[in-house]
Amino acid sequence: MRDLQRTIIDELGVKPSVYAPAEVEERVAFLADYLEATGAAGFVLGISGGVDSTAAGRLAQLAVERVRARSGLTDAVVMGHRGPIDPGHMPRPTRETTPSPSRENPLFTAVRLPYRAQADEADATAAMQFVGADEQLTLNIAEGTDGLAAAFEEATGRQIGDVNKGNVKARLRMTAQYALAGEHGRLVIGTDHAAESVTGFFTKFGDGGADVLPLAGLNKRQVRDVARSLGAPEHLWQKVPTADLLDGQPGRTDEDELGLRYDDIDDYLEGREVPAEVAEKIEAIWLRTRHKRTTPVGPREAWWR
């Protein structure tokens, strides 16, 4: 194994293989324990329709249910209803029936954050249904994104670039999630995992901005295994990953943007031998994107030198 490869694997905490049911239990327990330790009133997560947010969302819902169970609360009471309810016909919560989240009664909000119309609407709907969050919202970021783009053009005299605008979308989604979380003192769930972390494939202070990362230490194929173990629909955990941030190239795949296959990234993170050119590219990206995996740098820090 390459020296830097070992360092990266150790830093990201990736195992050469995982038993998905055990990973599910470990991560649900972690989320539940962390929620109680912080005294937060629940979680908020943006659901895209991809495997990462699908898996993270279901883990979050199971975690708040576990915390409520420890307090003796049933889902029927939490959802604002009394008596037995057929789980298959659970009424959607409303402002009138859903109590405010609290430390004693933590709730999970799953929010869709489309920019205008979402191309993979059916996948996003299926993911929301599977996650089964206490509260399901849709907050369209188009007005905020376009407003900032217009202000940018007015200030600079030029249009904002497509990649830059894509990062604005990601940061507005983060802002929206924190706005929802801030109302009742909840935590924002992030979907970053080792295959994204090693390549810096996230927007700094965008989808990289979160309070807790339940998928940390997993590579992409392991995230798929966790989603499958959770019972996610096959078309979601087998879905081709795409960030879908670019207006000019909607639906462009992650692998196309990275110039790397997830299978190669995952093999590298599991300590397997990969072609030298693949390893060198991963390591170059790792070093180049180090700033995205740390807090803002100060004059007395030396890691960047």
Image (tube, rainbow, N blue to C red):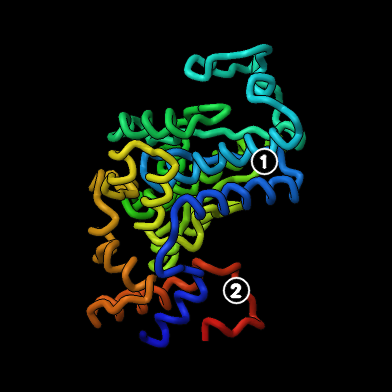
Q: Position of residue 61 (x, y in %)?
A: 56, 37
Kindly report which numbered mark, 1 or 2, lies closer to the viewer in this rendering: 1
Provide the secondary structure element on which disc 1 rests.
loop
Residue 183 position within the rendered picture, expressed as x and y whole percent measured from the top left: 68, 34
Kind of residue indicated by mark 1: Arg
Crowd rating for badge 1 (residues with CA inside 10 Å; few <14, some 14–19, many 20+): many
* CA separation in Å, label 1 and label 2: 27 Å
Mark 1 and mark 2 lie on one chain; the one further toward the N terminus is 1
Residue annotated with mark 2: 297
Which quarter of the figure has residue 227? top left
Q: Is residue 206 visible?
A: no
Numbered circle sitting on residue 186:
1
> In the rendering, at what x and y percent does residue 180 appear?
61, 35
| Relative height, residue 199 to residue 38 (above, below) | below
- The answer to whether the residue labelled 1 contacts the one labelled 2, judged by CB atoms less than 8 Å apart, is no
Residue at position x 24%, y 50% in the image:
252
Q: Nearer the viewer, residue 62 or 195?
A: 62
As rendered, which of 1 and 205 lies closer to the eye? 1
- The residue at 32%/40% (across/down) is 236
Res 115 visible: yes
Q: Residue at x 58, y 14 (%)?
A: 85
| Whole-percent x, y for residue 120 in the image | 29, 35
Question: In which quadrant will I find the N terminus?
Answer: bottom left
